[in-house]
Image (cartoon, rainbow, N blue to C red):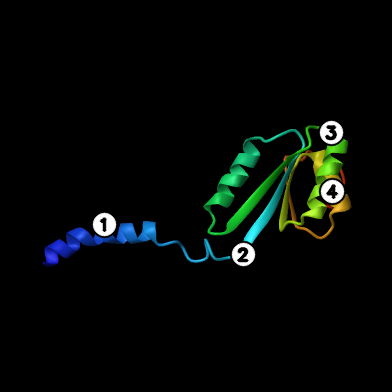
Amino acid sequence: MNRLFFNLFPWALALAVILVPAPGRFHAKAYAVAMVTWRGETIAENGFIQELDKSLLDIAITKYHADQDEEKLKAVITQIQRTPVDLIYVFGTIATKTVPERIKHTPMVFNIVSWSIGSGIIAS
């Protein structure tokens, strides 16, 4: 009997881990992230998404591509203002300078920015 228990226990434990949802994964608040890219999705965005997927949080990512067009970027910002999010991910210097000019109270993560101090994105 003991031998049977020790042979089956690891399998039963593994099955329980697979079948029982992690606490919070399906019951916690869903977080909304807007992903704004200047020139389309890159490996930087793929890495960001992969790391978010590893968390136990329920995260919905909406992707917006400005296609290197400032008017399209302004339209993207207007759309985000109409549907507020919990976090904004921004790729590129132009997009990173433009988004916070119109969206002031949403946390923002910026990525792939050249000379962030000299371009005026951060003070130091």
What residue sits 61% from the left and 55% below the top? 59
Question: Residue 45 location in percent, x, y?
Answer: 65, 41
Question: Residue 102 location in percent, x, y?
Answer: 88, 52
Q: Considering depth in this image, is 69 or 75 the residue closer to the camera?
A: 75
Q: In the image, what residue type sits under mark 1?
A: Trp
Disc 1: which residue: 11
The answer to which of marks 3 and 1 sits earlier in the sequence is 1
Disc 4: which residue: 78
Question: Is residue 7 left or right of 44 when viewed as pictured?
Answer: left
Disc 3: which residue: 69
Question: Residue 34 location in percent, x, y?
Answer: 72, 49
Instruction: Give the crowd class for mark 3: few <14, some 14-19, many >=20 residues within 10 Å.
Output: few
Question: Which numbered disc, 4 or 1, marks the residue closer to the eye?
Answer: 4
Q: In the image, what residue type sits under mark 4?
A: Thr
Instruction: Give the crowd class for mark 4: few <14, some 14-19, many >=20 residues within 10 Å.
Output: some
Disc 2: which residue: 29
The answer to which of marks 4 and 1 sits earlier in the sequence is 1
The answer to which of marks 3 and 4 sits earlier in the sequence is 3
**Vertical relation: 45 (above or below) 21:** above
What residue sits 18% from the left and 58% below the top? 7
**What distance separates the C-alpha of mark 2 from that of mark 1?**
32 Å
